[in-house]
Amino acid sequence: MNILSHGSAKRSTFSRILRNMLNLEVIVRWVLAIFFLVIAIFPIYWLFNVVFSPPGTAVAITPRLFPTSFSDGMVKIQQILAKGPFLKATMTSFVYAYFQIAGMLLVTSLAAYEFSLFDFPGKNVLFTLALTGMMVPLAVTIIPMFRVVVALKWVNTMAGLAVPGMASALSLFIIKQLMEDIPRELIEAAEIDGASHFRIYWNIVLPQSINALLTVSILTFVYVWGSFLWPLIVSNKPDGYTISVLVASLSGTTAYTPIDQLVAAYFLAAIPPVLVYIFLQRFIVDSVARSGIKG
Amino acid sequence: MKFLRKYSKNYFFLLPFFLLFGVFFLWPIVFGIGASFTKWNGVHTPSFIGIDNYAGLIQSPSFTKGMHNLFLYILIAIPLGVFIALIIALLVNQFKGFWHQFFRAAFFMPFVIPLFLAAAIWRWMLTPEFGIVNVIIKSLGGPDIKWLTNPTAMLFAVLIVDMWRAAGFNMVILLAGIKAIPSEYHEAAKVDGASTIQQIFYITLPLLEPVIFLVVVNAFISIIQMFDVPWLLSRADYNTQGGPQQGMLFPVMDMLGTAFGKQRYGEASTYAVVLLGLALLITVIQFAIRRLYAKR
Amino acid sequence: MSKKMLYTVFAASLIVAMILTGCGASGTPSATAPAVVTEPATAPATEPVTIEYWTFGEFANTQAMKDAIAEFQAANPNITVDVVGKPDTEIQAGIIAGASSGQIPDVYNIALNVGAEMLKAGALKDISAEWNALPEDYRNQFAPGAVQALNQGGAVYGIPYTAYATVLYRNLTVLEEAGIDPSKGIKDWADWADQMSKVKAAGYTALPNYSVDGWLVFHFLGGVQGITNTIVDGKSSITVAQLTKAYQFLLDTKPFGTDVGPFDAAASDLFINDQMAFYEMGPWADTTFAAAAETNPNFKYDVVLMPGEIEGWSGGTHGGEFFGIAPGPNAEAALKLAVFLADKAQVAKISAEFGGRATYNDAAMADPSLSTYALLALTVEAASMGLPDAAYFQAFPLAVRQPLADNAAKARDGVLTPEAAAQAAIDAVNAEIAKASQ
């Protein structure tokens, strides 16, 4: 390429950009996108600003467009860390999420394996029965569920927290839908080769379902992290509080938590899921998308 | 016996799921249905009273208010929610490469924020007169909306928080559906001179219909179960739920108040049965409608 | 890591986890025997026993409480006390949720106004035998009204502890800006409304929105002349006329105030930032304001009695908390702890640590160490007027707060006239009472 054509290449790129900028469609697209972006991100940004500003500045009555003091924010965070077992509660929430996800994956993938690839008497009845699980809110079954947990002596234990949620109908549904895509020839070939039922599940079907497994893991993680009602009843000692219950207890009207520290508490509670999301966001959004359309 | 041998491995693998499901879900439901016919304060032995609870429930003003709020909310939230998610999905689809990924990730982010956090933050932002939302509205010339005390506005407050969270999630699903449409259709349309808008209406939307249907069904079910957002937004406790004039009262909240606040578990179980029936009914109706529509 | 290894690690960790959870790995294992509703023989006094004590979070964290527990355990080497601090709503929720399965704490602090609920849940033991066996001057140190409330037809359900009464906080800066002389005080509701209009005219806001919660409505009901109780003979003794007056006052003062409820952060923001003149609440709000005044010397406020409808009558609501003992094998040890903590020495110490928190222990309140706390004296005076926050140990369920608030909101928004709203409220309250006593 000689000097002359290089120049003209630059000119045409420039004029392309210029033309794009004046193109109505592009403008509309960007304006709308920025509008929605602000709405989506602003509440977190606002929380960040409230935390990182001098103590005593009003929380609700002054608009917070910028953070103003990094050090003040750190002080507030330190104060609230001293007020409650934050680290412990965060750990508890993580462990709770881990166990519920692990158990749920095992239990639902085994069942989804059967429902998606095999036929047996009562298959439809059982599946429809499982589907009703999606239609019932937790609050409906919570009292009898608690009585069962007490009878099992699982109050204030991780088992009591995590086990009841493992039979997730929604996860079963999603995994089953995606497992159905696995080519039957693969299964039949393995059966001919003499592979055991479990082998087929473990070596063939599971690896192929990784998208579904990821999706339901993420959905469960978000749900567990925000879940509040169940941990409140089952884990009622401050030692075993999850982060959701801890933050809720700090924000009660007679809890004596200064508003500045309360905001710092919220901020701390928001960090783990946001961090997890930022790092894994590619996987998360992709797998939700891929599972979604199969549903 | 041969029958059992043939299928035993299948049932064996189903066992863990259905064991847990039976103990922690089916049994509580059966128990709840049974309890709905009793008068029971949770401690002493229940006493059987037939359908008195159901009669009482229908006459209860909180039940009426809760159901009224629920239906109103369904009427507004589902069309609006799907509409907004659709718009955002179509919008994000117009971007390519980095910006596509960026916007997709950014719009999904509100979904991972724990609910109790979202409710608290929005409550602060929706403070009448002084909260940032009203400050912005007033600077644009609008009225000071009483998000937390006017019953109509309260439902919209719930809507805002709910949609803020759910739009991103629904958008991702719709977006995947959009991308699944083979690009030949769009290219052919472009050759024929169709504008972007026309392409959306004549190609994208019709082919997206099954995905939209699923988003709608899912929305119905989760709205009937709606609890966390209005509970936290109205600062409910076991004695008072729903805020001034019960503007944010939803059935599940009332149920919890009856159970833990008034200690009338029999009545609370009745609520549970009613809600379960409602959810089943709506789902069945929706699938039936779809099948009829598809046959045409 | 290959996929196979990943799955194996995953499955193995799951199995390990299951085994661990079987041993109750998370949280402190509960060493107390679950309290049961029927009463087996109490354990002999010298056997080691651990009791669980639920109290308010802020109390559990005080030096006074820690010292008290240490002292008690030293004097009773066979008793170990497990102190759990929780917000009061969660104490109630936890006991109700656990009552149906016997999972309740051995001794706990809870509000008098949920005493009836606790009794219904089977979480309160009748300690009349032990109470009457206590020395007379121990029993006489408590306010007679509180003792009476806990005595239901001969059965004694607890020992009185802390108390509260709501008072009025005034932002002096705002009042001065509005041309009001704070030293003149507030005569009655008419005077108060007048002051509020002056505040509004000066460009400030007068008062938060008290129609958002039934308990708040009680504050204003308390200001109605002549009202002293809430229930008589199984029906609400609040008359429609009295409630109408309260609703009318809220409606009349609506233009001068803001829509923000007093429980919202925004309300205390407004008060602390010299935007709002009045804030009526219990003495616990003082902690926040005192802290704010420390960081911001320009913020000046004082505390007075909430004005009533007529001069010489003050409004507000009052109530208190007590020690409840759960039935069960640990009841004897639990009662010992309660008797120790409710005694005037301990009560005075805790009260001092909170800047003069009012209690039902008259002897402790008379202690010279507390004489410097002005808020304490004011609270005690306020408690002698106004409205008790419930009918203790009678079927006056807290659920009545819902219709009281709903109709207050309707009156305030003009959906109903104050009188119609009051009538609807009283009807709903009586319906709730009837249902609860079935």
Image (cartoon, rainbow, N blue to C red):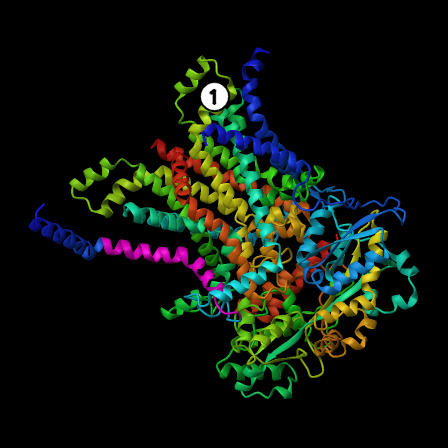
Q: Is residue B60 left or right of residue A4?
A: right
**Which residue is at a point 51% across and 39% down the rendered structure image?**
B281
Number of marks present in the image shown: 1
Does the magenta stretch mainly form a helix, a strand or a loop?
helix
Give the image location of residue A241, x and y in percent. Answer: 62, 50
Instruction: Look at the image and tell me whether residue C157 can be seen.
Output: no
Residue A73, compared with residue A86, is above or below; it is below
> Secondary structure under badge 1?
helix
Residue A170, compared with residue A195, is above or below; it is below
Residue at the farthest top position? B2
Q: Nearer the viewer, residue A176 or C51?
A: C51
**Which residue is at a point 60% across and 73% down the rendered structure image?**
C289
The three-letter code of the residue at mark 1 reads: Ile
Q: Is residue A126 left or right of residue B77?
A: right
Instruction: Look at the image and tell me whether residue A6 can be seen.
Output: yes
* Rendering quarter of residue C421: bottom right
Give the image location of residue C381, x and y in percent. Answer: 74, 77
Q: Is residue C287 left or right of residue B217?
A: right
Residue B49, compared with residue B250, is above or below; it is above
Q: Is residue A44 magenta?
A: yes
Q: Nearer the viewer, residue B198 or C415?
A: B198
Q: Residues within 10 Å of mark 1 (few under 14, many from 20)?
A: some
* Rendering quarter of residue C215: bottom right
Q: Chain of mark 1?
A: A
Q: Is residue B186 magenta?
A: no
Disc 1 target residue: A200
Numbered range of the magenta stretch: A26-55
**Which residue is at a point 61% across and 60% down the rendered structure image?**
A82
Q: Nearer the viewer, residue B10 or C253?
A: B10
Give the image location of residue C262, x and y in percent. Answer: 58, 69
